[in-house]
Structures are given as C-alpha cells and as structure tokens.
C-alpha cells in the first residue's frame, strides 16, 4: 500500500531541497518516511538507514567519516539514533553552502531532543510527515482548506455515512495497518507497534525508567484525546507527580504519538482560555489501545464524538502542514464558549470548524461560531463557519455558516 500512494509532501520536500542545504522530515515510525524519500529520489540518492546495525555502528564511531558525501544527496534515516551526526553535518554545510546536500528523517522531533545540542537553524527546512490522510489513500488533491475558505463545496458528497467514517477512523493512517481488514489482526498490529515504540525507540531519545508506567499512561492519554487535559486527575490515578507526568507526555509528543493543538489567543479578551487541546495522532492506534468496538462506538455519542473529532483533527493537520499560510488552533473561553478548530490564514481570515458525529444539523449548532464572530473578532476579520457532519448534503444556513459532509475533507 505505501509503495503505491504518492504522499502529499513530495512536492514540498523537492522544493525545499532546491533551496536549503538540509531538509529534515520528522514523523512517527512506520508513517512512511522511507517511502517518501524513495518517491523523492527514485534510485538516485545515497541512502543510509540507522536501523541497519552496521550503519549505526559506523555513524556512532566515526560521525565525521559517515557524513562524507559521494556526490548525491545523502539520505539518513532515523537520524535521532546518532545525535553526533548533527554537529558534523552543520560543519559540512557551513563549508559548502549548496542546497540539497542532506535529507534527514527521524521518528522523533530532533529539535526537542536533549542529546542534540547543535541547531541546524538557517541551514535546514523542517517538514512533518503524518500517517496517511484519507485523501492520500484515495489519490485526491489536498484542496479542502482552499475550498472551505471560499465555501465552495459540492451539493452532495455520497458514500461516507457515520458508519463509514468510523470504519476509516478504526483503520487509521499507518500504511501497514490500514490495509488489514480483520479487526483483531489490525489491533494486534497496533498493540505490537506501541510495545515496540516504548521498549525499543524510547531509549534513543529519553531516559524512561518505568516502561510499565508509560504503557499504562498511554491508554489514559488516549482516552483524553479531543479534550482539555486535567493533569491532576491523571497524577492522582497513576500516583505520579506532575513533573514526571509532564516529562512522559513531552516524550510521547516528541515521538509524534500525541499532539497539542494551541489555543487561538489573538485577542486581549479576558475570558479566553490558554490551554491546548490534546489529540492522539492516529485513530487506529487510539481505538486499539482503548479496546473499542465499532458497533458500540456507533451507538455511543461520547465515543463516536471523541473518535470522529480526533479523526477530523488528523485530516486537518495533514492539510495544514502542506502550506505555511495556515495555522491550526482551537478556541475555548472560561464561560464555556468553544469552537473545535480554528484555521487562521496568513491574511488573518478565519475558518471555524465544529465537528458533529451525527446526521442532523440545525442553526443552533452554529451559535458558538456566531457568538465568536460577533463578540471576539467583532466582525473585523473575514470569518467562515463550517459544521462537519455525517450527512451527505451541503446546507447553507446563512451567508457564512454552512453544514458540510465530513467526507469533504477527502472526497472532493
């Protein structure tokens, strides 16, 4: 599956290699970074993976010799395994400022790793590769955000009701897992994946003493997806202190297992909250870790709401990553007014997105967005409000408030 799907980030990486000396692609293990690098350089690069024990031994013992180029772009997979390569690459590209010298991939955010003290600032372009978006699987162009700001949607988008969306969410975006039709076998893949991450990959980036605690924490954090985290509840449940909890969460975020969506705070309005919203980065892993059943999720408004909102986050984040003119955030104030997602464009236009798991939408569902437009931005910026729901019709409720099928994220 991964070999057949052209990733959306290919053009961004190719463009960056024409301008920057180093390009860094970061993303969770098994998200397709190696496949992406082969799509960029089909047989025309110097590939070196640090998953190969001989290559890793070479990199650790002789980092200066390891990074000597052969004339082609050098691709180094899993660079976080050999932190000493970074200062050597920095020195090399300071001597030779030509673009496209190194393409580095990592299963952890190297900007946050304590073992990497040198920065490639001004030398490197950093790009994020997420698990497959559904639009990539279907080979559709990533046009949702462009169309959403214009409110240009088809009248109907059929073929994706609530049950279909839940099925897509259960599959997730990891290429190997997404093609497994048997639910139990797919869950086995996800659980083996998590165990491998915790038992093997963590040692490359953090000193985690209690892996058993981290395994338990993983399930608890998965349950907090699409919510504002109450750390006091977690520390009490696990009998750990806040410092340890923060350290473990930051480690999992640096490995792209979880993500914090920042609040929209471009206002001095005193009621605006400052807390990020917490999301798991793959709904397939999420459903497996929580042991959910698709039929029960369909019947549970709480579970289906949490799952579909997390799924929408993953699709929106993949789209927003493609263009720096978009910024993904969320809004919640101290009086309970909340908008699931806000996308701000570089011209300060705002797109608000609410997520509904069900098939019905009314004007009342737009009240938080109307209130935000009138009371926070006070109609001083262009604002477009959308509700994504499980129906198949586009319904315009007012000039800038529209209900849109969730499938518009990938099916246009």
Image (cartoon, rainbow, N blue to C red):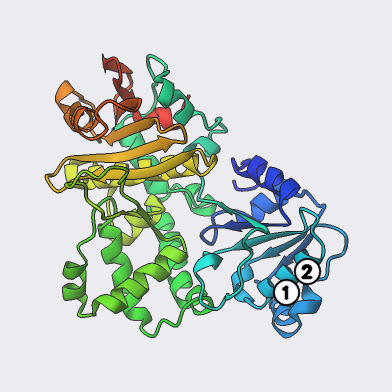
| Rendered position, 308 above or below 377 | below
Q: Quadrant of residue 166?
A: top left
* Residue 295 appears in view: no
Count of number-bearing discs: 2
Residue 300 at x, y = what percent? 18, 44
| Label 2 residue SS | helix
Residue drawn at the location 55% of the way across and 78% of the way down: 115
Q: Residues within 10 Å of mark 2 (few under 14, many from 20)?
A: some
Residue drawn at the location 22% of the way across and 50% of the way down: 273
The answer to whether marks 1 and 2 mark residues whose Cβ atoms lie closer than 8 Å is: yes
66 relative to 15 in the view: left or right: right
Q: Furthest residue to the front?
A: 268
Residue 89 at x, y = what percent? 72, 69
77 relative to 110 in the view: left or right: right
Residue 179 at x, y = what percent? 50, 47
Q: Residues within 10 Å of mark 1 (few under 14, many from 20)?
A: some
Q: Quadrant of residue 366?
A: top left
| Label 1 residue SS | helix
How far apart are labels 1 and 2 at the CA level? 6 Å
262 relative to 129 in the view: left or right: left
Residue drawn at the location 66% of the way across and 78% of the way down: 84
Residue 284 numbered mark, or none = none
* Residue 67 appears in view: yes
Residue 92 numbered mark, or none = 2
220 relative to 323 in the view: left or right: left
Q: Furthest residue to the left?
A: 335
Residue 325 at x, y = what percent? 50, 38
Q: Which residue is mark 1?
A: 88
Q: Nearer the viewer, residue 177 or 115?
A: 115
Residue drawn at the location 19% of the way across and 41% of the way down: 299
């Amino acid at each position: 599956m991964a070999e057949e799907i052209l990733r959306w980030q290919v053009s961004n990486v190719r463009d960056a290699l024409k301008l920057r000396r180093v390009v860094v692609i970061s993303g969770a293990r098994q998200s397709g970074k190696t496949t992406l690098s082969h799509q960029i350089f089909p047989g025309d690069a110097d590939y070196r993976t640090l998953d190969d024990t001989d290559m890793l031994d070479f990199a650790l013992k002789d980092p200066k010799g390891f990074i000597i180029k052969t004339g082609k772009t050098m691709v180094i997979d899993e660079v976080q395994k050999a932190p000493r390569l970074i200062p050597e690459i920095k020195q090399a590209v300071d001597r030779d400022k030509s673009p496209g010298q190194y393409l580095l991939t990592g299963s952890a955010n190297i900007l946050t790793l304590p073992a990497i003290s040198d920065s490639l600032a001004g030398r490197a372009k950093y790009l994020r590769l997420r698990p497959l978006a559904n639009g990539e699987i279907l080979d559709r162009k990533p046009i949702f955000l462009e169309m959403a700001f214009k409110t240009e949607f088809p009248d109907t988008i059929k073929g994706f009701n609530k049950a279909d969306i839940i099925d897509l969410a259960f599959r997730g975006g990891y290429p190997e897992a997404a093609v497994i039709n048997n639910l139990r076998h797919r869950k086995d893949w996800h659980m083996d994946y998590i165990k491998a991450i915790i038992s093997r990959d963590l040692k490359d980036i953090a000193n985690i003493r209690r892996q058993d605690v981290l395994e338990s924490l993983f399930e608890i954090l998965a349950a907090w997806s699409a919510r504002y985290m109450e750390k006091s509840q977690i520390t009490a449940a696990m009998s750990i202190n806040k410092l340890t909890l923060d350290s473990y969460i930051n480690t999992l975020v640096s490995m792209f297992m979880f993500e914090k969506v920042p609040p929209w705070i471009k206002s001095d309005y005193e009621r605006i909250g400052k807390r990020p919203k917490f999301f798991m980065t793959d709904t397939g892993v999420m459903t497996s870790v929580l042991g959910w059943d698709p039929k029960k999720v369909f019947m549970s408004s709480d579970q289906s709401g949490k799952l579909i909102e997390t799924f929408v986050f993953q699709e929106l984040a993949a789209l927003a990553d493609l263009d720096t003119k978009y910024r993904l955030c969320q809004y919640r104030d101290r009086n309970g007014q909340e908008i699931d997602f806000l996308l701000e464009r570089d011209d300060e236009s705002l797109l608000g997105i609410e997520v509904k798991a069900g098939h019905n939408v009314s004007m009342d569902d737009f009240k938080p967005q109307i209130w935000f437009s009138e009371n926070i931005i006070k109609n001083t910026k262009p604002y477009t409000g959308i509700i994504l729901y499980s129906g198949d019709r586009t319904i315009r409720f007012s000039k800038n408030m529209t209900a849109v099928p969730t499938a518009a994220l990938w099916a246009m």
